[in-house]
Image: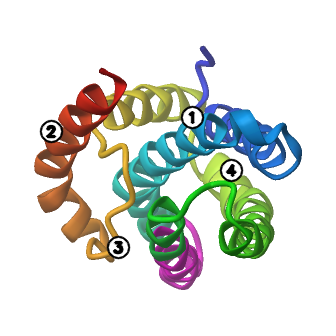
Amino acid sequence: MTDNGIDLLISQHQQVSALLDAVETGPAAGRQVSFDQLRELLAVHEAAEELVLRPITRHQIAGGNEVADARMAEENEAKQVLADLEKLDANSPEFLEKFTAFKADVLTHANNEETLEFPAVRAAEDQDDLATLADRITKAEAAAPTHPHPAAKSTTANAALGPFAALLDRARDALSRH
């Protein structure tokens, strides 16, 4: 566990990248498991960014509204594609084709965050703020939905829908494991 919110997010981007590779190039027998892990990580990670990081971006960095709006647009598109992928057989040709494009978009999004948003937030916040950010992200992820919810297109919608969606998602996950 890191004591810096930006480092935590970058570490999660590395986990996402490894899972993207596992889904795309790993054995077919494990593709669904890798995809489910990826889906859950992306869902909680993006929800936490939307609820915790984006308000900081909007209020603490120059041009923050434009940066946050662009990242939200990327995330909203990814939520829809992730929801579409979730409905497909992970070993089907359609899944693999859509997943290849999805992977490229996710990596572009992560790069945009790491080059356009994270350095500016890091510069605007002191070490105590960054430590608090890590704690707030961790808490938001613990309560976040584990499946994509494309209808939640704004920070406000995520805050309103999130707790209810998270309860349903976690119940659905528990039932699917048994």
Query: Is 60 in front, or is 93?
Result: 93
Count up the numbered dots: 4
The answer to whether mark 3 and mark 4 are in CB contact below 8 A is: no
Amino acid type, mark 2: Leu
Q: Identify the residue shown where x is 57% and y is 58%.
A: 89
Q: Are marks 1 and 4 in contact (CB under 8 Å)?
A: no
Q: CA distance from mark 2 to mark 1?
A: 25 Å
Residue 140 image-quadrant placement: top left
| Mark number, residue 167 | 2
Q: Secondary structure at mark 4?
A: helix
**Where on the picture, by quarter, is residue 167?**
top left
Q: Earlier in the sequence, mark 2 or mark 3?
A: 3
Local packing at callout 2 (Cα closer than 10 Å; few below 14, some 14-19, many 20+) is: some
> Circle 4 sits on which residue?
123
In the displayed structure, does residue 4 sit left or right of residue 150? right
Residue 20, horizontal then vertical, whole percent: 76, 49
Q: Residues within 10 Å of mark 3 (few under 14, many from 20)?
A: some
Q: Position of residue 112 (x, y in %)?
A: 75, 68
Q: CA distance from mark 4 to mark 2?
A: 36 Å
The stretch in magenta equals: 61-79
If you read the primary sequence from the N terminus, does the residue marked by circle 2 or circle 1 appear first?
Answer: 1
Q: Amino acid at mark 4?
A: Ala
Label 2 to label 3: alpha-carbon separation:
17 Å
Q: Is residue 9 magenta?
A: no
> Which mark is in front, 3 or 4?
3
Q: Secondary structure at mark 3?
A: loop
Quadrant of the frame with the N terminus: top right
Q: Quadrant of residue 119?
A: bottom right
